[in-house]
Amino acid sequence: MRWLLKKRVFLVLLIGFIGMLFLNSDWMARWMYPVQYREDIRASASNYKVDPHLVAAIIRAETNFSNGKVSSKGALGLMQIMPDTADWIVEKAGFEKVTPDILKHRPDVSIEIGTWYLQSLHKQFGQNKIAAIAAYNAGPGNVRKWLDSGRWDGREETVSLIPFGETRHYVQKVIYYYNKYKDLYPEM
């Protein structure tokens, strides 16, 4: 009889715990969509007047906040910057020399360089966030061709018209994470 009471108590506690997880969806959502390196993101976003939610969304899409990554194409670090692009950024922004090893292993450096680049893309595309996201993935030359030829108009509503499937999915993913982070971390 006593074991039956213990089972019932355990079952009630288990159901209560599961109910709390689903009722307290912010807690669950923050667990599913964490933001690491928040201070570095805030600092770089503030320095370059870029939305920190967008920086976090790009990091999530690129590496899921996993430091030390190298893509199959050679992109490095949290924000997956190509070494040639990093060299160009260092020259244009006047940063100190950044080696591939530093870019790969120093989250603060990857975030700083990636955020500067994102700000540069925003400027190139007239503050069009969606075009800047596409250019982060496909390169500004490709995005400029699509816009100039009329293949894509740079709007979120027409992302399905982006000619590169990888870039189309990338933009959709970044926008999804961006909206998630804005909802979950409004204070960021």
Image (tube, rainbow, N blue to C red):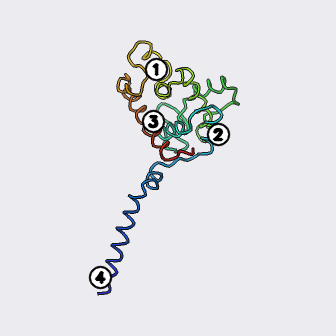
Crowding near pointer 4: few (<14 within 10 Å), some, many (20+)? few
Location of residue 137 in the rendering, given as x and y in whole percent from the top left corner: 47, 28
First in sequence: mark 4 or mark 1?
4
Cα–Cα gap, marks 4 and 2: 57 Å
Location of residue 168 in the rendering, given as x and y in whole percent from the top left corner: 39, 28
Cα–Cα gap, marks 4 and 1: 66 Å
Front in this rendered view, residue 65 or 150: 150
Q: Quadrant of residue 180?
A: top left
**Residue that label 1 marks:** 143
In the rendered image, the quadrant that contains the N terminus is bottom left
First in sequence: mark 1 or mark 3?
1
**Residue that label 2 marks:** 43
CB atoms of marks 3 and 2 within 8 Å: no
**Residue that label 4 marks:** 4
Q: Quadrant of residue 100?
A: top right
Residue 174: give its label: 3
Crowding near pointer 3: few (<14 within 10 Å), some, many (20+)? many
Location of residue 125 in the rendering, given as x and y in whole percent from the top left corner: 52, 21
First in sequence: mark 3 or mark 4?
4
Location of residue 104 in the rendering, given as x and y in whole percent from the top left corner: 58, 38
